[in-house]
Image: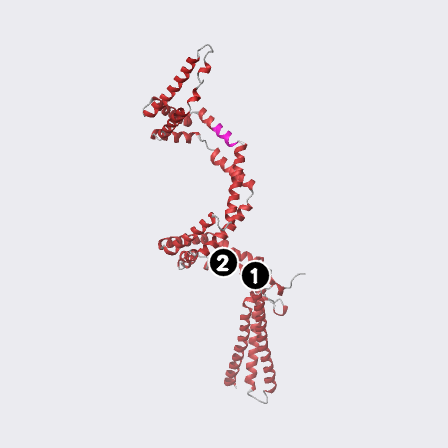
Amino acid sequence: MPRTPTELLSPADRERRRSLQVMKGVALGALLFMAVVFVVAFVLQERFTWLAYVRAAAEGGMVGALADWFAVTALFRHPLGIPIPHTAIIPKRKDEIGRSLGEFIETNFLAGEVVRTKLESTAIATAAGAWLRDPEHADLVSREASTMASGILRALSDDEVQDLIGDLAREHLLSPQWAPTIGGWLERVVDAGAHEGAVDLAVDSLATWLRANRESFSGLVSRRLPSWVPSVAMRLVDDTVYNEAVKFAAAVQADPDHPARHAVDGYLSRLAGNLQHDPTTIARLEDAKSAVFDSPRVRELAAEAWNTAKAGLLKSLADPDSALRRRVTAALVEIGDRLATDEALQQRVDTRIADAAVFLVDRYRHDIASIITDTVEKWDPAETTEKIELMVGRDLQYIRLNGTIVGALAGLAIFAVAHAVLG
C-alpha cells in the first residue's frame, strides 16, 4: 500500500508543517479580525464618528493582508487556482532556481581562496594527531581499515587477479628483452671486479667438496680404460686425477692471478658482450625465459602464491591480535603522536591538505555544484514547492501578519491626514 505524502515526510518536516499551519491560522485570523472590525465600524460610524478612524485602519489592514497573502501564495501556487500571470513562480522556475543556486554555491563557496582561508584557520593535522594518538582511536581506524581491506579482497575475483598479474608480468617482465640488460649489468660487474668474491666462493666450495668426496674419483677415469690394463695402473690413474684436481683447486685459491681466474674473467666479458650484441645469444636467452614463464607449473605456482597470500591477509586482518593489526595500530599511534607534537610536520600536512583541497575545488567545483542543479531538475515541481514552503513558509506567514498590521497603520494614517487636510 503506497504511503501518503505526509508519511513520506521526515519528523523535522512534519514539525515544520505543523508550525506552518499554525502561522497560516494566525495570519488568517488577523485578516478575519480586521474584517469583523471593519464591518462593525462601518455600520456604527454614523453614530460614533470616531469609528471612521477604526474603519480606515481595518480597511487598510484587510488590503495589506490580502496583498501579502497574494504575494506569498503566488510564490508557490496560483492564488485560488486561477492561472494569473507571474504566479506559481517556484514550480514554473524550478530548474532556473536550481541553476541559480548551483551557480551561487560555485561562485561564493567553492572558490579556491575561500577554501584555503577556511582550512588554514583550522589546525587539521594537530586535531587529527591528538585524536589518532589515543590507542583506542587508532585501534578503531585499524579495525575499520581491516574491514574495508577484507571486503575488497573478498570482492576480488581470483581468476581476474591471476590474469592481471600474468598480464602485468608479461608486459613488464616478459615483453622487454632481458639479454641486453643482463649483459650490461654483467659487464659493469666484471669491470668493477665485483665477481671475484663469487669466484672465490666457487673455488673454495670446489676445494671443500674435493676433500670430502675422494671416493667419487674411484673409477672416474679407469672404467674407461681397456680391460687389459692392470688394476694397479687404474688406481694410479684415478689417484693422479684426484690429486691433480685438488692441486688445481688449491693453486687457484692461493693465486689471485691464476690463469683460470683470467679465463673466467674472459668468459664473463665475452658473455656480457654477446648478451648485448650477439643476436644468437640474445635469442637463446629469450627462448629460455619464455619457456620458463610459459610453463604450466609456473602459472600454478603463481596461482598458489596469490591464494596463499590472500588467505594469510584475510586471517591477519580478521584477528585483532595478529601481528599485522598490532603493527598497524602502533604505526597509527606513532603517526598521531608525531602529528600532535611536530610543528614542522603539522605545517607540511596542513599545507598539502589545503593545496589538495584547492586543486580539487578549482578543478571540479562546477561538477560539484552541478549536483545541486541536477538534483533540483529531477525533483517533481509539487515536491519542490512543498520542500521550499516547509523551509521558509512559516517565516513568510509573518510577512502576511506584518502586512496586516502595517496596512492598518497606513490606512489609519492616510485617513487621518486626508480628514485633517480635506475635512
Q: Which residue is mark 1?
A: 94
Taking 191 as reference, is 362 above or below it?
below
Quarter of the figure with residue 270: top left
Few, some or many residues within 10 Å of mark 1 (<14, 14–19, 20+): many
Q: Is residue 244 shown above or below 112?
A: above
Pinpoint residue 31: horizontal percent, then vertical percent.
Answer: 58, 77
Residue extending furthest top? 228
Front one among 395 and 153: 153
- Identify residue for label 2: 103
Identify which amino acid the numbered label 2 is placed on: Glu
Q: Position of residue 354 (x, y in %)?
A: 41, 54
User: 259 or 222: nearer the eye?
Assistant: 222
Q: Is residue 178 shown to the viewer in this render?
A: yes
Query: Toward the viewer: 417 or 177?
Result: 177
281 relative position to 377: left or right:
left
Quadrant of the rendered image containing residue 190: top left
Amino acid type at circle 1 is: Lys
The front one of 271 and 348 is: 271
The answer for how far apart the CA atoms under marks 1 and 2 are is 14 Å
Q: Which residues are magenta?
A: 286-294
Determine whether the residue tagged by mark 1 lies in a helix, strand or loop: helix
